[in-house]
């Protein structure tokens, strides 16, 4: 009976070891799955660490269980089985001794048969006792193995439940990551829209500033023309020539009222062009129309107007201004190469013009627009060095700081 119980125990042990190996393989596969999720955030890393810890606990439990089973099996083989075999060998020896004695005394007397039967009966009882004890020990061993198997199954079930929870948690985290990515994309889209709106607003502000500068230039030109007209009329009055309006300025000693003459000097009409190059009415009208077209955003119309003005009146007092605004027309149309040529022409052909600093500044801006940082920096430094107290020098310094 002892020999019949050992295969069953070995089979149970093999099944348990196979189940544990399967669990280990499942744990290894699961660890591989976790390795593919390396892009998850800190929470996933913590979950992976927890799984690794549970896996280590499971491996330790498996190792302890395997060691315990091996120890019990070894104990069974080293202590119990040799004892049983020794008893069986001892019984066999006794049986052989009795058999020999029976053989010796078989012919001696029939009375000794009772002794032999008694000895056989005692031997049978001894063998039965040994067999019963072996069966009890096998039953206890099977019970212990069953309890261990249940404990391992319960532990594996708990780990399986934990792994299911972790899998659900990872699924939830993946969904959350997808949601966060979607929200981030939407936020970036909103930010891009905001940046576009700000850029548009900045362009609008820049255009407004340029328009305001154009208006200031126009007013300065009007003041200059008015002053020139006042000077011209004052000269005519001093020479005794009639002012514009057909009346002659009174001379010293005349009895005529001098009120009208004083009024003509105080509020001069638009100056006529003299041979010295002062702007005439036709020049002023063409220049004003071109400047108004530029302010209205009609860069092509303004360009044609200023070009026509420069061809008709190259020696006008407004020629330097017209050349500058021609460059502004090219700049506004984003034709930066021709804008640079036009601004260069201001400095070459009209070096005494008040527009030279502004032309140099816008030339530097055109180089910036062409992404030519070297020439842009050189031109802007020229503005700072040549016209250090001008408003254009301040703007050039700000742009140089941005380029750095």
Image: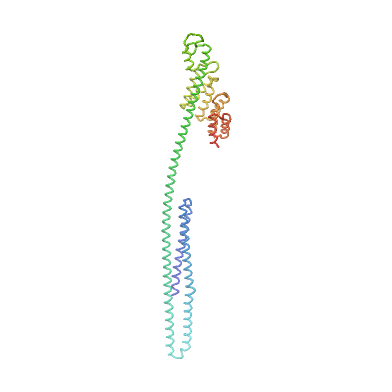
Between residues 111 and 16, which one lies in front from this camera angle? Answer: 16
Between residues 132 and 111, which one lies in front from this camera angle? Answer: 132
Q: Is residue 151 left or right of residue 280?
A: left
Residue at the farthest bottom position: 108
Between residues 168 and 5, which one lies in front from this camera angle? Answer: 168
Image coordinates for residue 166, horizontal then vertical, percent = 43, 55
Vertical relation: 30 (above or below) 373 = below
Q: Is residue 133 left or right of residue 384?
A: left
Q: What residue appears at the point 41 percent right and 60 percent down from the top-left corner?
A: 158
Image coordinates for residue 25, horizontal then vertical, percent = 47, 60
Image coordinates for residue 196, horizontal then vertical, percent = 45, 36
Numbered label tally: 0
Vertical relation: 383 (above or below) 130 = above
Structure colour scheme: rainbow
Picture quadrant where residue 184 is located: top left
Q: Quadrant of the N terminus?
A: bottom left
Q: Quadrant of the C terminus?
A: top right
Q: What residue appears at the point 58 percent right and 30 percent down from the top-left corner?
A: 385
Image coordinates for residue 290, horizontal then vertical, percent = 48, 23
């Amino acid at each position: 009976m002892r020999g019949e119980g050992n295969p069953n125990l070995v089979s149970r042990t093999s099944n348990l070891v196979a189940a544990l190996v399967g669990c280990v393989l499942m744990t290894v596969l699961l660890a591989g799955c976790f390795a593919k999720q390396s892009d998850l955030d800190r929470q996933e890393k913590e979950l992976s660490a927890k799984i690794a810890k549970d896996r280590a606990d499971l491996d330790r439990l498996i190792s302890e269980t395997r060691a315990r089973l091996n120890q019990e099996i070894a104990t069974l083989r080293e202590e119990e089985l040799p004892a049983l075999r020794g008893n069986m060998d001892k019984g066999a020896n006794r049986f052989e001794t009795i058999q020999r004695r029976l053989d010796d005394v078989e012919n001696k007397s029939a009375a000794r048969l009772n002794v032999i039967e008694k000895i056989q009966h005692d031997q049978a009882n001894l063998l039965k006792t040994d067999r019963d004890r072996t069966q009890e020990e096998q039953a206890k061993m099977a019970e212990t193995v069953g309890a261990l198997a249940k404990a391992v199954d319960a532990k594996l079930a708990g780990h399986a439940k934990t792994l299911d929870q972790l899998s659900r948690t990872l699924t939830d985290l993946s969904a959350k990551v997808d949601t966060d990515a979607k929200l981030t994309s939407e936020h970036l889209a909103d930010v891009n829209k905001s940046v576009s709106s700000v850029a548009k607003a900045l362009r609008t502000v820049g255009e407004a500033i340029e328009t305001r500068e154009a208006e200031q230039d126009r007013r300065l030109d009007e003041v200059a023309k008015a002053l020139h007209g006042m000077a011209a009329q004052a000269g005519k009055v001093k020479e005794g020539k009639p002012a514009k309006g057909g009346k002659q300025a009174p001379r010293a000693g005349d009895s005529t009222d001098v009120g009208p003459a004083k009024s003509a000097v105080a509020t001069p009409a638009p100056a006529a062009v003299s041979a010295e190059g002062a702007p005439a009415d036709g020049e002023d009208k063409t220049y004003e129309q071109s400047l108004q077209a530029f302010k209205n955003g009609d860069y092509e119309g303004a360009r044609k107007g200023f070009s026509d003005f420069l061809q008709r009146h190259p020696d006008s007092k407004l020629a330097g201004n017209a050349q500058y605004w021609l460059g502004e027309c090219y700049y506004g149309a984003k034709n930066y190469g021709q804008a640079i040529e036009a601004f260069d022409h201001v400095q070459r052909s009209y070096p005494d013009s008040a527009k030279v600093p502004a032309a140099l500044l816008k030339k530097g801006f055109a180089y910036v627009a062409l992404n030519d940082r070297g020439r842009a920096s050189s031109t802007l430094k020229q503005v700072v060095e040549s016209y250090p107290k001008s408003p254009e020098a301040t703007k050039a310094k700000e742009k140089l700081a941005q380029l750095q």
